[in-house]
Image: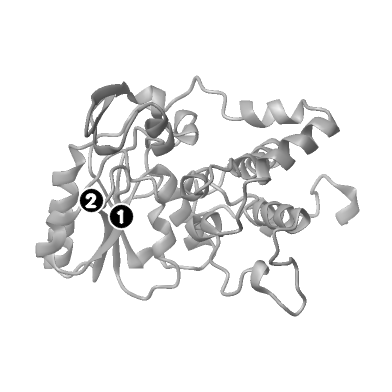
């Protein structure tokens, strides 16, 4: 994906120089390996700082909510779907945006890379099919398929769904993947096994809210975890409070989550909380044939009502 760099920079320079946008939101090289940072540029000469590779997993749609400026934004498939959601939910206007679409081949999992290396990593270079990793005392190449983020390995919407220009040729979409194998595995468990599974999963949670802060869907002015009148959930490390936070946040993402993986990527203790939002995604697909962020013209199933909806209790 390194070949996208020149096209992204050229587009950003042109848009800013011609006054098409007031700013461009993209990525710059991070101070740590595998940690490219979101950045906002307003001058054409700053466009050369923009980069794109398989370390750009943060969802940039997180940075456009409520803005009034004309914005250029670099967007891969899941980012573009979240942009559609923001437009649908009246958080931004479509004519405010100039979308530089990125056909995406997947992001790498920095934890997976770290686990395959001994010693401190000082450099990670993403090549076409491999990741070249170097440290103070080692250098190795790892197949991208071995360290790809789990959500990317089963993604079927790698190309942007809306854009004003593309930074490269569209990639071939994956068709031979089982998107919900992890959800179905948990569904097949007994009640006791499910309880133990989630108890173990949440046991590491330190309530840092990194998942919430990284999620482009969590834009409420006051989150339910901060409500005091009434108080929805306590601030303690009590197991009930931790479970309540994760389950309620997942329900708030129902019919809206694009499986971008930003929550898990941000988690400092490696909690697989995407398991919950993936279950909501599967239920919406099974019951309504709905996938979030694919159309500006169709309303999400959970904010519409039809007299012939299948459940009799709502009539």
Which labelled disc corresponds to residue 152?
Answer: none
Q: In this view, does 148 lie above or below 258?
A: above
Q: In which quarter of the image is the N terminus?
A: top left
- Answer with the quarter of the image where residue 172 lies: top left
Q: Is residue 120 left or right of residue 11?
A: right
Is disc 1 in contact with disc 2, using a CB cutoff of under 8 Å? Answer: yes
Front one among 290 and 49: 49
The colour mode here is one colour
| Residue depicted at x 28% and y 56% | 26
Residue situated furthest right in the rendering:
313
The answer to whether any part of residue 125 appears in the image is: yes
Count of residue discs? 2
SS category of the residue bearing label 2? loop
Q: In this view, does 172 lie above or below 247?
A: above
| Residue depicted at x 63% and y 45% | 277
If you read the primary sequence from the N terminus, does the residue marked by circle 1 or circle 2 appear first?
A: 2
Front one among 139 and 248: 139
Q: In this view, does 130 lie to the left or right of 58?
A: left
Q: Mark 1 points at which residue?
A: 37
Q: Position of residue 168 (x, y in %)?
A: 23, 38
Disc 1 crowd, CA 10 A, few/some/many (<14, 14-19, 20+): some
| Residue depicted at x 49% and y 32% | 150
**What is the spatial separation of the Cα atoms under label 1 and label 2, in whole angstroms?**
6 Å
SS category of the residue bearing label 1? strand
Which labelled disc corresponds to residue 29?
Answer: 2
Q: Position of residue 269 (x, y in %)?
A: 53, 46
| Residue depicted at x 47% and y 53% | 82
Q: Quadrant of the C terminus?
A: bottom right
- Answer with the quarter of the image where residue 245 lies: bottom right
The answer to whether any part of residue 217 appears in the image is: no
Q: Is residue 71 above or below residue 210?
A: below
Q: Position of residue 267 (x, y in %)?
A: 51, 49
């Amino acid at each position: 994906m390194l070949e996208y760099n020149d096209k992204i920079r050229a587009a950003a320079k042109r848009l800013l120089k011609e006054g098409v946008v007031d700013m461009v939101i993209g990525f710059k090289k991070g101070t740590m390996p595998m940690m490219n940072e979101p950045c906002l540029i307003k001058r054409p000469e700053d466009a050369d700082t923009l980069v794109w590779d398989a370390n750009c997993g943060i969802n940039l749609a997180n940075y456009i909510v409520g803005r009034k400026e004309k914005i250029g934004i670099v967007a891969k498939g899941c980012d573009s779907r979240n942009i559609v959601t923001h437009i649908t939910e009246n958080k931004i206007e479509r004519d405010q945006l100039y979308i530089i679409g990125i056909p995406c081949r997947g992001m790498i999992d920095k934890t997976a890379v770290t686990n395959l290396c001994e010693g401190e990593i000082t450099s990670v270079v993403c090549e076409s099919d491999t990741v070249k990793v170097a440290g103070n005392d080692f250098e190795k190449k790892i197949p991208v398929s071995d360290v790809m983020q789990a959500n990317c390995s089963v993604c079927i919407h790698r190309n942007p769904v809306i854009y004003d220009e593309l930074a490269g040729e569209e990639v071939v979409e994956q068709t031979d993947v089982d998107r919900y194998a992890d959800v179905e595995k948990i569904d097949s468990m007994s009640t006791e096994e499910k309880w133990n599974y989630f108890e173990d999963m949440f046991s590491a949670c330190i309530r840092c809210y990194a998942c919430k802060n990284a999620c482009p869907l969590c834009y409420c002015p006051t989150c339910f975890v901060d409500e005091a009148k009434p108080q929805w959930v306590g601030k303690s490390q009590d197991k009930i409070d931790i479970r309540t936070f994760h389950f309620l946040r997942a329900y708030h993402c129902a019919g809206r989550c694009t499986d971008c993986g930003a929550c898990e990527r941000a988690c400092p203790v490696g909690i697989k909380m995407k398991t919950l939002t993936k279950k909501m995604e599967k239920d919406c697909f099974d019951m309504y044939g709905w996938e979030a962020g694919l159309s500006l013209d169709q309303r999400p199933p959970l904010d519409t009502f039809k007299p012939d909806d299948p459940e009799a209790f709502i009539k």
